[in-house]
Image: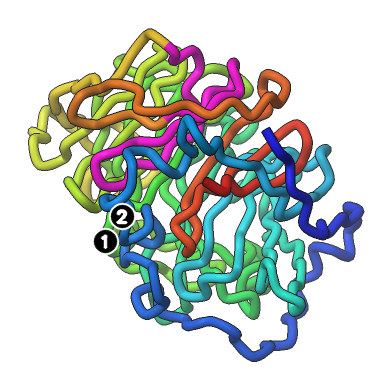
């Protein structure tokens, strides 16, 4: 395996990095719309548009030409970066989620001479973004591109936790609504403690979350957001699937990924060493369940538990990204990345990173159709070049 190095940005953690003053809006070097950039699909972002014309799982390389790891960003390992995504409305801006500090790293114009690194944390992160295991970009809104996250905790013992909605507008995110002192969040709902993964559900303000406390998959619809720093959650909808069917592992993420191709959610069931698929269209109402705030709906739903892959090479599937007919997953124990056929449930190809156990967490596709992944222990972001 050959390792390429790209000039990294190494930053020290200090209070000044999380200031909420807005940055200068530099000229955009790339199209803002995810669908207009050459070679980019509208799945924000999935496999390259020509992926079906190449060998299966070519993103991990071939027998003749193994993929190469390229370091694209280096941060402080003590921050524990765990997840990453490119901003769909600004495709060269890479956002990185840091578990230990609860802040976001924004690498603007990555890979260009105009690269700029911004460290930003919500002033009320101790509740709204405490130990975030993952995040996911969602829809556009009056506040700009939105994203959702969740916290791996129980809010000090009262279990008043769940997904939070934010904006990627850096003139808003990180600021504070002084009328409420509730920071800059756009919405929050509270029925998922010890969240280990989150995914946009493909439309509106809808998200799925991995609930390691209830061992379930929870669906959330924030409906209309309440604006930066307010707290009206009354229009929210929560549906709980698969209670006691999935199992998290403490200290690891269990990613979930919405596949636009087949309208299903794919789940890294880490503790049970398997990948599952949830089809919400097959969900049936069972009964309501109690919660911490009055909302429109909070209910148990039934749906078939479909096993895509289990056993074999899978030890601790953690990061996960489904695109087309393939699901890509990182294995936290073996430090391998696997490409699995959704239809056949077989491993198409694997890539050994040779990183220490516990290093691999989230992975995602960039606007170039290549895989980017997190080295949690090393504080690094790598790209796979097939």
Judge whether residue 336 is colored magenta. yes
Q: Nearer the viewer, residue 127 or 82?
A: 82
Residue 23 place in picture, x, y as percent: 74, 82
Q: Are marks 1 and 2 in contact (CB under 8 Å)?
A: yes
Pointer 1 residue:
203
Kind of element beneath mark 1:
loop
Tell me the residue at 73%/38% (across/down).
Answer: 80
- The relative height of residue 342 versus residue 178 in the rendered view (above or below) is above
Residue 17 place in picture, x, y as percent: 84, 63
Residue 376 figure quarter? top right
Instruction: Give the number of the disc on residue 206.
Output: 2
Residue 288 place in picture, x, y as percent: 19, 33
Residue 162 as seen in the image, left or right of residue 382: left
Outermost residue to the front: 64
Kind of element beneath mark 2:
strand
Tell me the residue at 78%/36% (across/down).
Answer: 378
Residues rendered magenta in the picture: 313-338
Instruction: Give the number of the disc on residue 110.
Output: none
Res. 282 in view: yes
The main secondary structure of the magenta stretch is strand
């Amino acid at each position: 395996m050959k390792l390429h190095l790209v000039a990294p940005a190494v930053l020290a953690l200090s209070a000044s990095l999380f200031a909420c003053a807005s940055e200068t809006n530099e000229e955009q070097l790339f199209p803002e719309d995810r669908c207009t950039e050459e070679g980019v699909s509208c799945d924000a972002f999935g496999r390259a548009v020509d992926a079906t014309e190449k060998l299966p799982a070519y993103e991990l390389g071939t027998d003749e030409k193994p993929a190469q790891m390229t370091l694209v960003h280096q941060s402080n390992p003590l921050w524990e970066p765990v997840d990453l995504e490119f901003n769909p409305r600004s495709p060269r801006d890479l956002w990185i989620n840091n578990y230990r500090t609860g802040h976001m790293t924004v690498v603007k114009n990555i890979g260009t001479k105009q690269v700029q690194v911004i460290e930003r944390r919500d002033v009320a992160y101790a509740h709204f973004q405490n130990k975030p295991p993952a995040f996911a970009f969602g829809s556009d809104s009056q506040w700009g591109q939105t994203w959702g996250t969740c916290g791996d905790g129980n809010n000090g013992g009262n279990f008043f936790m769940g997904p939070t909605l934010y904006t990627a507008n850096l003139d808003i995110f990180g600021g504070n609504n002084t009328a409420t002192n509730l920071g800059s969040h756009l919405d929050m709902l509270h029925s998922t403690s010890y969240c280990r993964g989150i995914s946009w559900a493909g439309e509106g303000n809808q998200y799925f979350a991995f609930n390691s406390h209830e061992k379930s998959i929870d669906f959330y619809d924030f409906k209309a957001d309440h604006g930066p720093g307010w707290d009206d959650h009354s229009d929210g909808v929560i549906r709980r699937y698969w209670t006691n069917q999935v199992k998290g592992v403490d200290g690891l993420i269990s990613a979930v990924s919405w596949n636009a191709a087949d309208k299903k959610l794919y789940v890294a069931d880490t503790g049970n060493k398997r990948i599952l698929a949830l089809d919400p269209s097959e969900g049936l109402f069972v009964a309501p369940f109690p919660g911490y705030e009055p909302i429109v709906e909070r209910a148990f739903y039934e749906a078939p538990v479909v096993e895509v892959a289990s056993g074999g090479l899978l030890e601790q599937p953690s990061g996960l990204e489904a695109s087309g007919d393939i699901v890509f997953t990182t294995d936290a124990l073996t430090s391998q990345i696997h490409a699995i056929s959704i239809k056949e449930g077989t491993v198409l190809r694997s890539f050994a990173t040779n990183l220490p156990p516990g290093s691999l967490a989230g992975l995602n596709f960039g606007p170039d159709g290549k895989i980017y992944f997190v080295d949690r222990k090393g504080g690094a972001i790598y790209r796979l070049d097939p």
